Amino acid sequence: VQTHLITGAAGFIGSNLAARLRRRGDAVVLLDNLSNGKLANLRALQGDRLVHFARVDCADADAVLAAVQSAGFAPIDLVWHLAANSDIAAGIADLRIDVRDTFLTTAGVLAAMQALDLRRLNFASSSAVYGDFGGRAVDEDAGPLQPISNYGAMKLASEAQIRAACESFLENANIFRFPNVVGVPATHGVLLDFVRKLRATPGHLEVLGDGRQKKPYLHASDLLDAMLFAAAKLERGFNVLNIGPSDDGISVREIAEITRAAVSPDAAIAYGTAPGGWVGDVPRFSYSLDRLRRLGWRCDCSSKAAICKALNEIIEQEGEVTCSA
Ligand SMILES: NC(=O)c1ccc[n+]([C@@H]2O[C@H](COP(=O)([O-])OP(=O)(O)OC[C@H]3O[C@@H](n4cnc5c(N)ncnc54)[C@H](O)[C@@H]3O)[C@@H](O)[C@H]2O)c1
């Protein structure tokens, strides 16, 4: 039995990770400021004596420290730092958001870890650190890294802080560079956006960008499998790892058509003209997963399968259309 600290635990991936770790019998200390996550996402863990939740701004190292101490659990074995701003477009409109919620939360978590003498960290990084490689499959050593969003910039800056901390007090830090992750409880992302738009205006779906954007998508359950597998293998040093599906992605056009067929088959799809959906959106992205495979990871998970599975889950999450006419 291990004890874990998860930041961003009330969010989409954090709540899935917490549930998964509890299922295998581990204890979890969960932190979130509830800016995007919801307590309802942790409902299944309520009342569990091996779960402690605290509403904390993770940029505040003292608050993180106090929350961990007040949990009163055995020493923390592993920290999973997932707290971040997940809205890329919001971070472009207001430059302070990613600094505060992505960069400073990493600083706060590291300072609290140092004070608590915690030495193992897993970090939720992103393909956004790479910037735009024009769709060429990038491995972990690709460079120069030139993120095109503040979100990516602050993830990269967080990676750098973590790397430096490995010189002083961290014994092990795993940087997991996620692709697009889908599933429930969905808090953001293209599928939730399309389902909500089609529910609001069943005859019409507006797509941001020309629909030819193509990216890898992974279901949250496969992401957790890969992360837990890799974290168990990589118990020392500083490691950077791409995590992704078995293929090189699916286009936004195909996602729009799959969603239309499931939610509102008669809707007209209106595409934009720009190659990216918004400023900071990398239009075509693809991963090399050789390092993960060399570690022994095998997964037959296609982007399309992830999209279809998550779409059904999100349709259920969003409930039936209610007509008040
Ligand atoms: N979902 C994806 O496709 C994807 C892709 C790449 C990387 N990631 C990374 O994975 C992690 C989890 O993402 P997610 O999709 O679950 O997003 P999410 O928004 O559902 O979860 C992030 C959580 O962090 C919390 N948070 C934000 N600022 C905070 C702060 N200052 N203090 C405490 N909590 C704070 C939010 O309330 C939210 O619950 C994030 O670091 C994200 O950048 C996600």
Image (spheres, rainbow, N blue to C red):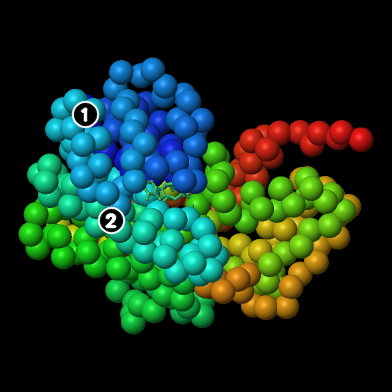
267 w.r.t. 96: above or below: above
Q: Is mark 1 within 8 Å of ligand 1?
A: no
| Residue most extreme to the right | 325
Q: Which mark is residue 106?
A: 2
Q: Which mark is residue 70?
A: 1
The one nearer the camera, 186 or 32, is 32
Question: What residue type is disc 2 on?
Answer: Thr
* Distance Cα–Cα, label 2 vs label 1: 21 Å
Q: Residues within 10 Å of mark 2 (few under 14, many from 20)?
A: many
Q: Residue at x 46, y 72 (%)?
A: 149
Q: Residue at x 9, y 63 (%)?
A: 167
User: Is 292 left, or right, of 65 in this rendering?
Assistant: right
**Residue 157 position by quadrant:** bottom left
Residue 186 x/y as whole percent: 56, 44
User: Is 229 left, or right, of 277 in this rendering?
Assistant: left
Question: What residue type is disc 1 on?
Answer: Ser
State which quarter of the image contains the N terminus.
top left
92 w.r.t. 302: above or below: below
The one nearer the camera, 160 or 95, is 95
Q: Residue at x 17, y 52 (%)?
A: 111
Residue 67 x/y as whole percent: 25, 35
Nearer-N-terminus badge (2/1)? 1
295 w.r.t. 141: above or below: above
Q: Which mark is residue 35?
A: none
Q: Is mark 2 in CB contact (under 8 Å) with mark 1?
A: no
SS at badge 2: helix
